[in-house]
Image: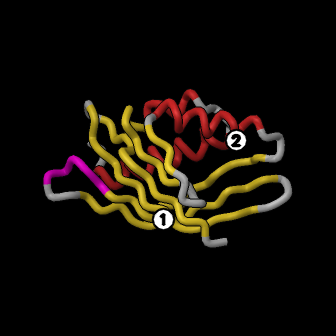
Amino acid sequence: MTAPDEAIRARRKLTNRLIGEHQAQRLRPFFTADVKLIVGDGGLVLGVDAVLDVFASQFADLDFIAYVRETQSVTLDAEGGRAAEAGHWTGRWKTHEMGGTYLAVWKKVTGQWAIESELYVTLT
């Protein structure tokens, strides 16, 4: 059995790959239905359908390359059903790059880790 820290890090790597391949719909299993996302400029996106719509619109931008999230830590709660992932994110376009820090809350849902909420702070 994979340790929760390793499972979350592996799922994060998969989301990075799918974003790099611009596959919005394949990201669905990585989010809870009621996911809450605070994007880098402070905007709020509620629900998995809205999150996938945001990804799809960014993927339609011909200058967009990818978002990469680099996990720095994963902290598990005492019951083993929720975890906090913290790290650094980078967004890349053909013409520029931006990045900052992020915090993601993961929740174990039917045996898989899914993102319950994420907060991104743009710093560069």
Span colored in magenta = 79-83
Q: Where is residue 9? Give x, y as percent.
A: 43, 52
- Identify the main secondary structure in magenta: loop
Q: How far apart are marks 2 and 1 (CA)?
A: 22 Å
Q: Residue 57 sits in which quadrant?
A: top right
The residue nearer to you, when weighing 16 against 28, is 28
Q: How many numbered tags mark residues here?
A: 2
Q: In percent of the image, x 45 and y 67: which residue is there?
A: 72
Q: Residue 47 sits in which quadrant?
A: top left
Q: In percent of the image, x 54 and y 65: which residue is there?
A: 121
Query: Label 1 amino acid?
Result: Gly
The answer to whether residue 120 is magenta is no
Disc number lying in front (2 or 1)? 2
The residue nearer to you, when weighing 117 against 6, is 117
The answer to whether residue 80 is magenta is yes
Tags 2 and 1 touching, CB below 8 Å: no
